């Protein structure tokens, strides 16, 4: 995340955190992320947009994509309870209120006082592989979902209403 926000640090992409934690726990039962890493910025994004993006890029079923989002969101909820040095941001805040996010990050990690969230970054978006500031593509991505896609996504999200409520996401009914 730090790299995407304009610093030189190399960090995993937004989906890697969930996957890396699952892999570490599976192969290294004594792995304790809270002891290994001292500070965390917990990120979240709209489930419909995430499912659409994963499906478009990875050519996976919409069911598998939304199940991935649910697993990661549930892990983030556990992270919020167990990680003592963490802040929460979401993609929507990051793209729509970059200055507010910048201040939140600097208050949490003062050493990042030169962070430039509005900096152009390399992205693979609906517009292709381009360089641009972080842009909220949620509505465009959700518009690409069919009524059947929405029904399938909602079938899974309806099973975890506490997750949707926790992150404040509204259901999209077709």
Image (tube, rainbow, N blue to C red):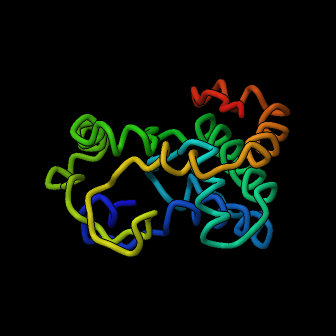
* In the depicted structure, whether residue 173 falls above or below residue 106: above
* Lateral position of residue 125 relative to residue 141, left or right: left
Task: Answer with left or right where residue 110 lies relative to residue 54.
Answer: left
Which residue occupies 72% across, 62% down? 22
The N terminus, quarter of image:
bottom left
Image height of 41 relative to 33, above or below: above
User: In the depicted view, which residue is nearer to us: 88 or 152?
Assistant: 152
Seen from the viewer's position, the closer of residues 130 and 46 is 130
Q: Residue furthest left?
A: 114
- Number of marks in the rendered image: 0
Q: In the image, residue 66 lies at what x, y percent?
A: 74, 51
- Residue 82 spot, x, y in % from top left: 62, 39
Please report the residue visible at 70 percent of the width from the left and 72 percent of the height from the top: 59
Location of the C terminus (image quadrant)? top right
Image coords of residue 86 (percent x, y): 46, 41
Q: Would residue 127 appear left or right of 31 to someone viewing this image?
A: left
Residue drawn at (75%, 70%), measured in percent from left and top?
A: 28
Q: Within the image, what quadrant is residue 60 found in?
A: bottom right
Where residue 153 sits in the image (x, y, percent)?
76, 44
Q: Is residue 39 above or below residue 98?
A: below
Q: Residue at x 61, y 27 (%)?
A: 170
């Amino acid at each position: 995340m730090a790299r995407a926000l304009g610093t030189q640090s190399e960090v995993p992409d937004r989906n890697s955190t969930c996957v890396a934690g699952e892999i570490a726990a599976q192969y290294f039962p004594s792995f304790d992320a809270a002891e290994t890493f001292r500070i965390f910025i917990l990120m979240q994004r709209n489930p419909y947009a995430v499912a659409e993006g994963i499906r478009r890029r990875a050519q996976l079923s919409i069911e598998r994509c939304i199940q991935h989002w649910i697993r990661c969101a549930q892990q983030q909820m556990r992270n919020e309870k167990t990680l003592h040095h963490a802040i929460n941001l979401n993609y929507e805040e990051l793209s729509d209120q970059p200055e507010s996010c910048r201040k939140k990050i600097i208050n949490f990690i003062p050493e990042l006082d030169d962070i430039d969230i509005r900096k152009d970054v390399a992205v693979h978006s609906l517009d292709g592989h381009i360089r641009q500031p972080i842009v909220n593509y949620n509505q465009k991505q959700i518009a690409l979902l069919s009524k059947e896609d929405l029904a399938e996504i909602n079938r899974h999200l309806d099973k975890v209403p506490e997750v949707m409520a926790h992150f404040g996401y509204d259901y999209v009914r077709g």
